[in-house]
Amino acid sequence: MRNLCIHILIVTGLFMSGGCAKDTSVEAPGYRLRIQVIPVVNGNRLVRDAGQTNSWGEDFRVDVFRIYLGNFSLLNDGDVPVSDHPDAYHLIDVFDSTSLSIDLTGNERPFRRLRFQIGIDSIRNVSGAQTGALDPLNGMFWTWQTGYIHAKFEGSSAASIRPDNRFTYHIGGFQKEQDTKRIILLDLPVQNTWTLDKSGLTHIILHMDLDAWFKAVHDLPISGQVQVMQPGPLAVEYADNYAKMFSLENIERR
């Protein structure tokens, strides 16, 4: 009888312990963050089928613009990550509104900077067939030798020397001097630090200005180059430019 009582107590204790563990996981704090990407040209919101003008005075129309963003981190005053999302990639498509919102989770520790990556890490470029945002069926992959297209920009312009007035830029490359991956670091625009909490969803508004594609670090007017389809020095220059496309416009709690 005594042994039976001990056995019941042990089982009961294990059951209660398991129950407590389950309750704790349910009640764990969930701090929500949404990165909202807004495509613009010279500060004006991009409109499908509408004519645009770049800093060179060249008119152009956007037919396709896709770019990989990933590895988002929130950094504290010492630039130490307080919330990290490694190896998570998102394919941004300016004409797919669902792709322009990136939902992340965080914690209550204050942060002052947002860090993220344009492009795909070298390991992922040579890791075989993948799924989700990295599925080759998304049309953002060349071959296992050349890897992923980090950014794709297609459209038309009177400045193009091609008979059909088209321009086509497929920018990628992951090997040494051909690497077109870029790390972006942006300060908060409204105050020194911000803290996520459970009272609402925090929105970070990112402007992505396509004009920087043509004029930022390097001068790359459409009239000078209408097609890039492989890794190389010119692709690296476009990568230097697209690293300047992003600005952190606002942060707010809704």
Image: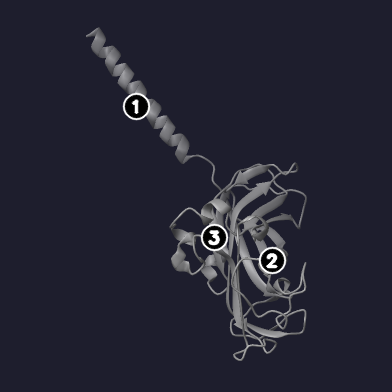
Mark 1 lies on residue: 15
Q: Give the mark nearest the N terminus, 3 or 1.
A: 1
Closest to the camera, between mark 2 and mark 1, is 2
Q: Secondary structure at mark 3?
A: strand
> Can residue 62 be seen in this snapshot?
no
Query: Is residue 188 toward the left or the right of residue 152 in the image?
Result: right
Image position of 104 with respect to 238: above or below: above
**Neighbours of disc 2 within 10 Å: few (<14), some (14-19), many (20+):** some
Q: Is residue 21 left or right of residue 9?
A: right
Please determine whether, in this image, residue 66 is positioned above or below residue 31.
below
Viewer-proximal residue among 134 and 46: 134
Tell me the residue at 49%/64% (across/down). 143
The percent position of residue 64, horizontal first and vertical second, equals 57, 76
Q: Sequence order check: which comes first, mark 2 or mark 3?
A: 3
Q: Which mark is residue 233?
A: 2
How far apart in space, not on screen, are marks 2 and 1 (Cα)?
A: 63 Å
Q: Nearer the viewer, residue 3 or 73?
A: 73
- Counting from the top left corner in percent of width and height, residue 8 is at 28, 18
Q: Are marks 2 and 3 in contact (CB under 8 Å)?
A: no
Quarter placement of the C terminus: bottom right
Residue 3, horizontal then vertical, whole percent: 25, 10
**Residue to which mark 3 is pinned:** 90
Question: How dense is the environment of label 1, judged by Cα within 10 Å: few (below 14), some, or many (20 and up)?
Answer: few
